[in-house]
Amino acid sequence: MKRIFTYIALFLTCVVSGAQVKVSSVEDVSGRTWLCLSSGDGLELSYSDKGKYVPSFNVRPESLSRVDFGQLWYAPDGVLYLYYTETDGYFDGKGVLKSISCTNPSDKAPQWSNPSEIGAGVCTGVPVVAADGSWIMPCALWGRTLIGRTPDIYGNDRHRDDSGEYSELDGMRGPMLHISHDQGRTWDEISGFVTVPEMVHGRYNDPQMINVPDGSLKMVMRSCGTGWSWASTSYDNGQTWSSPEKFVQNPDRKAAFAGLPDGRLLMVKVGKLDEGNKRSKGVAAMRKK
């Protein structure tokens, strides 16, 4: 049940003091809940203690102007990770995927590591552990239509300025993966492995990873303008992927997915189950994987 609430929290975006704030939350075996709030100006980390949240750590931009999309994840060994993206403005054409870790998240004085760079991309989900023990981290190399974008709090464009930087990455735009065979110490990048509808390449794609009971992996991707979330499957621990197929009707918004212990899939999305082009109230549903 704890994992269910973790993934629902990753779905939430709210407006606080005139800014979009993204929420990520996890709960450990002791009952402590960690919370990360992402606003673009930085990441605020806190944890629960006797009915209140105690500030723990702040992440601020290092060399670029924006830090956002913070997502918390417990590794199998109990280490708590925070993954996030640093970029110049809303999106500079590349983005830098980073992480920090905490080896004592249940202690009275949790200590966080210095940032570690994983590679290029926008943080869109948390890793899954494949059948061979490797960690597979999804991320996105957004399309050029989002470079230099300045959205308002409702996601509407106020300004756009594509300077032409990182044009050498245009052939890679779309879903990306970073794979680690040593529990997150080093990462290998895989990109350009999925052919998706052009609408997905043009804007957001936001891939997420799901473990399937038969040992395969499923990657679910957001699309813009198609009215669907698309899914691709890997049977070799993320090395190769099937051609994407329509997975669930979904408007141009990110949906959240989580695998349940009984093999079913929990989904939280915007709009009714049979709506793919209308943004309305959120709905939660379960289905077989």
Image (cartoon, helix red, strand yellow):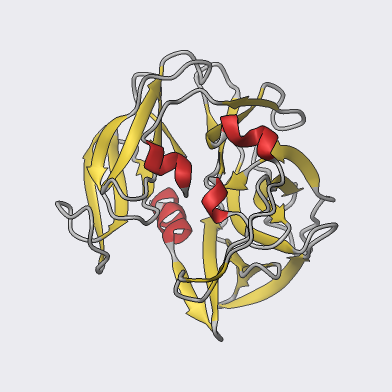
Marker count (numbered): 0
At 74% from the left edge and 51% from the top edge, which residue is drawn?
104
Outermost top residue? 236
Horizontal side of 43 relative to 33 (left or right) equals: right
Indicate whether 208 appears above or below 157.
above
Q: Residue at x 18, y 59 (%)?
A: 272
In percent of the image, x 23 and y 57: which residue is there? Answer: 277
The answer to which of 217 and 75 lies nearer the viewer is: 217
174 left or right of 96 in image: left
Classify 19 as above or below 280: below
| Residue placed most toward the observer, 195 or 123 | 195
Residue 137 in view in this figure: no
Q: Is residue 140 visible?
A: yes
Where does residue 113 sit, x and y in percent of width and height? Answer: 82, 50
State the residue lying farthest toward the left.
Answer: 274
18 with respect to 117 (left or right): left
Q: Where is residue 153 in the image (x, y as percent from the top left)?
A: 50, 76
Residue 163 position in % (x across, y down): 69, 53
The image shows residue 274 at horizontal and vertical percentages of 14, 51
Residue at 81%, 49% in the rendered image: 115
Q: Quadrant of the C terminus?
A: top left
Query: In terms of depth relative to the viewer, which is nearer, 158 or 114?
Result: 158
Can you say whether 146 is above or below 196 in the image?
below
